[in-house]
Image (cartoon, rainbow, N blue to C red):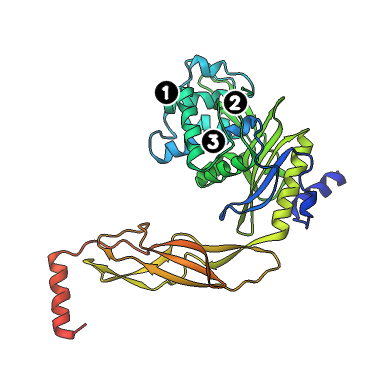
Amino acid sequence: MKKIIILLLLLLIPVKVNANELAKNSVSSILMEYSSGNILYENNSDEELSPASMTKVMTMLLIMEALEDEKIKLSDMVVVSPNAARMGGSQVFLEAGSSMSVEELLKAIAIASANDASVALAEHISGSTTAFVAKMNEKCRAIGCTNTNFMNVHGLDESSHYSSAKDMAKISRELLKHEDILKYTTIYEEYLNKPDGTSTWMVNTNKLIRYYSGVDGLKTGFTSDAGYCLSASAERNNMRLISVVMKAPTTKARTDDTVELLNYGFGNFKIKIILDTKADLGKLEVIGGKEKTVNLKLTKDATNLENINEEKKYSYKIKTNIVKAPVKVGDIVGKLEVIENNKVINQVDITVSKNVKKANIWDLYKRNLNFLLTGA
């Protein structure tokens, strides 16, 4: 019992680690900071290897995009095809002809790495797995993945089905932009209730979500060709890290390498918040608006990645566009440039603090009358 407690305490505490000693069990590995996409460590990260079920990171990304684009809804019912029902490997034993909601199938993918659920949703979204796989590869090209080619939606070994640690980190970063995915990847165990009254107990294949503080995703993988793989996401102290290890020899080696990478990141780096979304950026004139001016705000915090012992100094410039009414919160009206040593190191979009409608004739009459009477 004492050994277990000591192990858990070690997983909670980031420790300083020599980068040369990281993830030596795995053939390929990488550590990326989420907000900037900066690579903090990599080893052999461009090698093309079998990704196994880490493939489902891309599958889930396209599912989340379809939800965001309102092509599907979580409540939509999906009829399970014979093709999906007979899919081998990890599964939740869906029956052909039965119906499950998009949300339940998404849970089955995120928690239990269900191949049958992956195929069912791919067919529901694109009509066939072939069409869905084409979209997977198209998305890869769009986000700059140069060492990936998908042949299926689940990750079972197949000729010409490969990816790299660097590409898997990029895909994971894209998925994490859809924050709702964390509602599912953080579930450790849950029952999947089926239409026939039976249920399947699902246990998350990523055990680190329970045992490493801050881990909230993303996807494990294993086949005989791929070995043991894991794309992991963890957040502490306002910094999110993405680690990927590929072709580790055992589950323990996969876990050890992931913990080493995350400990290195949290032990050596930090995110400095330069300006947050509550910062006062002044006012902007709105031409033809019901209100003459509107307050400005950042769409997200302006940050920079620093070594944990650094204390850098920053300045910034605000650049705004000419804005005509109507304008609403979320509309991009300018940019904030973050400057270090006379160099722009980051740019953050600026929006308005509230919606401003277009002025009507009465609004303009009152405004002109006030100007005539007061000069203001």
The amino acid pointed to by label 2 is Ser
Instruction: Give whichever of 253, 150 is nearer the camera.
Output: 150
- Disc marking residue 159: none
Label 3 crowd bin: few (<14), some (14–19), many (20+), radius 10 Å: many
- The answer for how far apart the CA atoms under marks 2 and 1 are is 23 Å
The percent position of residue 129, horizontal first and vertical second, equals 49, 23
The amino acid pointed to by label 1 is Gly
| Position of the N terminus by quadrant | top right
Q: Is residue 222 left or right of residue 175?
A: right
The amino acid pointed to by label 3 is Met
Label 1 crowd bin: few (<14), some (14–19), many (20+), radius 10 Å: few
What kind of element bears circle 1? loop
What kind of element bears circle 2? loop
The percent position of residue 91, horizontal first and vertical second, equals 61, 23
- The answer for how far apart the CA atoms under marks 2 and 3 are is 16 Å
Q: Is residue 18 above or below residue 282?
A: above
The percent position of residue 68, horizontal first and vertical second, equals 42, 41
- Cβ atoms under marks 1 and 3 closer than 8 Å: no
Q: Which residue is mark 2?
A: 160
Q: Earlier in the sequence, mark 1 or mark 3?
A: 3
The percent position of residue 369, horizontal first and vertical second, equals 13, 78
- Disc marking residue 127: 1
Instruction: Give whichever of 255, 41 is nearer the camera.
Output: 41
What kind of element bears circle 3? helix
Instruction: Give whichever of 183, 164 is nearer the camera.
Output: 164
For residue 253, which quarter of the picture? Answer: top right
Q: Residue furthest bottom?
A: 374
Q: Which residue is mark 3?
A: 58
Q: Decide if residue 364 is in sight here.
A: yes
- Cβ atoms under marks 2 and 3 closer than 8 Å: no
In this view, the mark in front (2 or 1): 2
